[in-house]
Image (cartoon, helix red, strand yellow):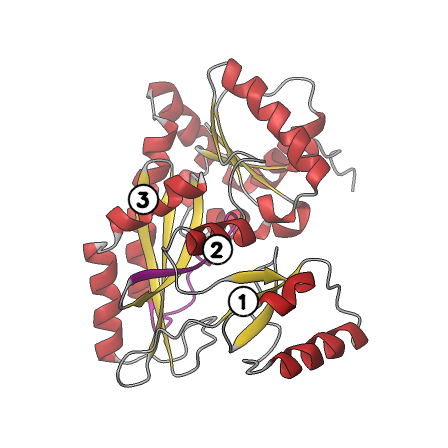
Amino acid sequence: MIFFLTTRQNEYTIESYLRGYGSTATGILWPMRYERFLRAKRLRAGTYVLADLELLTDTERERAAARARELADRGCRVLNHPTRSLRRFALLRTRYEHGQSRFNVYRLADAAAVERYPVFLRAENDHLGALTSLLSTPAELDAAVARLRRTGVSLDATIIVEFADTADATGLYRKYSAFIVGDRIVPRHVFFSRDWHVKSWQLVNAELLREELAYLDTNPHERELRAIFTAARIDYGRIDYGLAPGGLEVWEINTNPTIVWPSVERRPREDVHARFAAMLEPAWRELDGVSAAGEALRRRAAAVRFGGRRILRRLRGERPSRG
């Protein structure tokens, strides 16, 4: 049994997956909110995936670390240590300091130390992408910070990121993404764009689709990605990265990414989603270590799927509806 921990605001990632492509994992994966995880007197035995580390407060991370120690002492497996896993700033700065990346990151207070322009601003702990366009000079950076401050954006966790150009000779950008689930690296997708800020698939044609499917079939960067996840001490999440002449350029590791949305009638890249989902299910089963008892639980869960919401509420510790 795998308990999947999320914040209240981001539980849609696992629930949308279980309503669609992940429906066969309903007896394996059990969503749980951190409120329940942190206040429960005793937690059930199983594997615990601590997602959403970026959105926890420092106090919540410390409390979650104590719970993780309790579970480990009982022989349970815990994926993602709440305080030891590297989040975005530490990951990117560490890679730069070790000569594994061409770009550095800075706190706003260290803006004067920026070594190379252009740069852009982004939030340290969310996954919404850049807050600004590319800024070519210190004066442009100062002006962008002032604009954000006037709009009321919190700058406490805003960071400065040097731009690393990963476009190919034709000006095409590729953003690669892959999951780690326990011991498996599962390639997710390739997004193509003419814009440096790649947040979703922006170009789709038969040739690019073949390239994307080949990426899923060959998992060409598995060895390098495994080393990066290991260094970051992250056992579940999705890494986003590009390719440069010196190797992989890592943009971030999201510990609670969207997995795959329920199928929509023949989306342009439906084959990509289906192929990824087919590779992901064995990763969950391997992580769970499915036994005869686990299979029996899966069948029972499938039989009561329409009552699934009630089960989820109970696991989160919510009161049953009396309506």
Task: Please name the residue shown 26% across and 72% down the image.
Answer: 209
Residue 161, label in figure: 1
Amino acid carrying label 1: it is Val
Q: Which mark is residue 226?
A: 3
Query: Is 219 on the left-hand or right-hand side of 103?
Result: left
Residue drawn at x 31%, y 66% is 243
Q: Foreground residue, 2 or 182?
A: 182
Classify mark 2: helix, strand or loop: helix
Q: Earlier in the sequence, mark 3 or mark 1?
A: 1
Residue linked to disc 2: 92
Is there a contact, CB below 8 Å, between mark 3 and mark 1? Answer: no
Q: Is residue 154 left or right of residue 163?
A: right
Front in this rendered view, residue 256 or 61: 61
Q: On residue 218, which mark appears?
A: none
Magenta region, mostly helix, strand or loop?
Answer: loop
Q: Nearer the viewer, mark 2 or mark 3?
A: 2
Q: CA distance from mark 1 to mark 2?
A: 9 Å
**Circles 1 and 2 in contact, beta carbons < 8 Å:** yes
The residues colored magenta run 247-269
In the image shown, does 48 or 316 lie closer to the viewer?
Answer: 48
Residue type beneath disc 2: Leu
Work out whether 298 lies above or below 152.
above
Quadrant assignment for the C terminus? top right
Q: How many marks?
A: 3
Mark toward the start of the polypeptide (1 vs 2): 2
Q: Amino acid at mark 3?
A: Arg
* Magenta span includes 266: yes
Going from N to C along the chain, the mark reached first, 2 or 3, is 2
Residue 10: horizontal and vertical position, in percent? 61, 51
Distance in Å between CA atoms under marks 3 and 1 = 24 Å
Distance (Cα) linking label 2 and label 3: 16 Å
Q: Nearer the viewer, mark 3 or mark 1?
A: 1
